[in-house]
Amino acid sequence: MTLKNKKGNTRSGKMIDNRNREGEFLGSVGPIVKVTWNDAASTFKEYRINAENPSEHLTICETVGELVAEDDKAMVLVMHGSQCDGADIMAIPKDWAQNIEVLKECTSENSESQQE
């Protein structure tokens, strides 16, 4: 995996170039994790709002994937990877995460240096 300085759209910085991915399988760059997290929710025609526990109205999500990048604000999971189509990712704000469970440790010896 190669880190590149690249500017695309409105985002800039180090990008992981998935085309040159050294590992061929999910779990070869980072651990396989299950993240339980709260997402925003929009509800229509609601007759009752819980003012004592507003978090009741959030949506609880679970996402499973390979943790390939993270910083203080976000983590990026690869949920599907293909040599012809690239990677399907989910970026989750860290403060939305309620639990991160490692399902399988990384299978590559170089995983720590690749995530930096």
Image: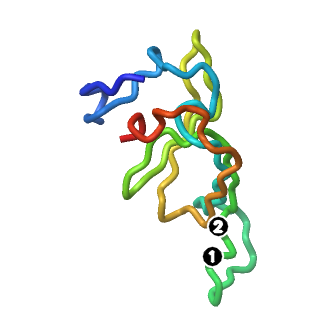
Residue at x 42%, y 23% (from the top left corner): 1
* Residue situated furthest front in the rendering: 109
In the image, residue 115 sits, relative to residue 23, either above or below, namely below
CB atoms at circles 1 and 2 under 8 Å apart?
A: yes
Residue found at x 61% / y 59%: 100
Up/down of 67 relative to 94, above or below: above
Dot 2 lies on which element? loop
Q: Position of residue 5 (x, y in %)?
A: 24, 27
- Does residue 56 appear to the left or right of 66 in the view shown? right
Name which residue lies at 63% across and 44% down: 105
Where's residue 43, x and y in %? 68, 62
Which quadrant: the C terminus? top left
For this rendering, which residue is in front, 108 or 97? Answer: 108
Secondary structure, mark 1, is helix
The amino acid beneath tag 2 is Leu
Judging by the rendered image, the residue that carries numbered circle 1 is: 55
Q: Residues within 10 Å of mark 1 (few under 14, many from 20)?
A: few
* Numbered badge on residue 107: none
Question: Distance between the Cα atoms at labels 1 and 2?
Answer: 5 Å
The residue singled out by tag 2 in the image is: 58
Amino acid type of the residue that numbered disc 1 sits on in the rendered structure:
Ser
